[in-house]
Amino acid sequence: MSWPFTRGLHDIGNGHYAYLQPSGTWGYSNAGLVVDGEQSLLVDTLFDEALTAQMLKVMKDATGIGGAEVTTLINTHANGDHTFGNSLVTNAEIVASKASAEEMSEQPPTMLAEFVRQAPSMGDFGEYLLHCFAGFDFDGVTLKTPTKVFSGELDIAVGDKTVKLIEVGPAHTHGDVLAYVPDDGVVYTGDILFVDGTPIMWAGPVRNWIDACNSIIDWAPDVVVPGHGPITDPKGVAVMRDYLIYVDEQARRRYDAGMSVEDAIFDISLTDYSAWDAPERIAVNVATLYREYSGDDSEPDTQALFGLMARLYKDRR
């Protein structure tokens, strides 16, 4: 089966639902809902409370499960477009990997709100920030962090269903988690998977991310709900995995040749991937790979990387 990439809740069968937000680019993420008996599990919230409230109302109207009725909330990783609506899920146990919970406190909504306020006076850099984030209300976000953390794997019972939480990070971020329901053949990936959009590797190592993609493919699920983009299957996972392999090969060749990270970013041809949303994210991916190759485990210079993405974005327009 296939489902249209349209905004709203999609019934994917056996008590599983996907909430999609086209076009899936900056901040417009997906979420999942698993329902069985008196239990329900929400996979991720959205980038601000208005978007999350709208999603929860749609879920309530369709299934009877809204923010007050969700029994477990899973945050697949720390980024705000998957966590900033947590406070509206009022009665749930919030579960995340230990690494994600630690990372959440380092990315408060107030920081993004301040960036957006200052952006109009920041030239091309500010224009790019507004392109990415102007559509969201970060001032209205009350950050609510996990109440239960784990490392490795954790099984969550949802009625008679077992949702397996599998930590595959660090990859996209420090603590990425997959939510897999083997009996129903459904995987909710968080940002381990982008479909028709460019993945962004803030943490790495790239091998972890490639291995996570290969695990999903090996499970052979019927339905894969990505963090961004349309619902897919293992073939969609393979397409994004191949992007990671390609960028790793291209970046390594230039690193070994002594090319600077900035020169490499502008030198690598995206060929078949140039039509994906946000191809400028290659700047972050190459910079992360260069740090990995050199053994540099420092945190990325986020402002500098957004500056490089802004230059690529302007060149593309």
Image (tube, rainbow, N blue to C red):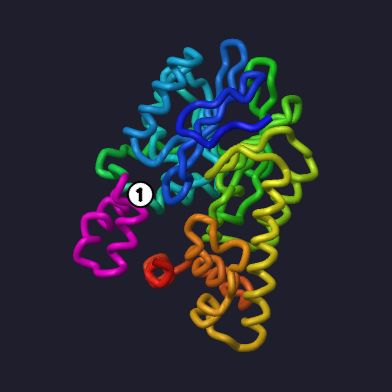
Q: Is residue 124 magenta?
A: yes
Q: Is residue 187 magenta?
A: no
Q: For the view shown, which residue lies furthest in the left direction?
A: 121
The residue lying toward the viewer, choosing from 309 and 161, is 309
Q: Is residue 127 above or below residue 14?
A: below
Q: Residue at x 67, y 41 (%)?
A: 166
Task: Give the labeled residue for mark 1.
Answer: 108
Secondary structure beneath disc 1?
loop
For residue 290, side relative to residue 29 (left or right): right
Q: For the view shown, which residue lies furthest in the bottom direction?
A: 258
Give the quarter of the image for residue 245. bottom right
Q: Position of residue 101 (x, y in %)?
A: 49, 44
Where, quadrant-wise, is the N terminus in this rendering? Answer: top right
Q: Position of residue 156 (x, y in %)?
A: 64, 27
For residue 161, side relative to residue 81 (left or right): right
Q: Position of residue 262 (x, y in %)?
A: 49, 79
Residue range of the region highlighted in magenta in the rendering: 110-135
Q: Is residue 191 above or below residue 258?
A: above
- Helix, strand or loop: magenta stretch: helix
Residue type at numbered disc 1: Pro
The residue lying toward the viewer, choosing from 291 and 133, is 133
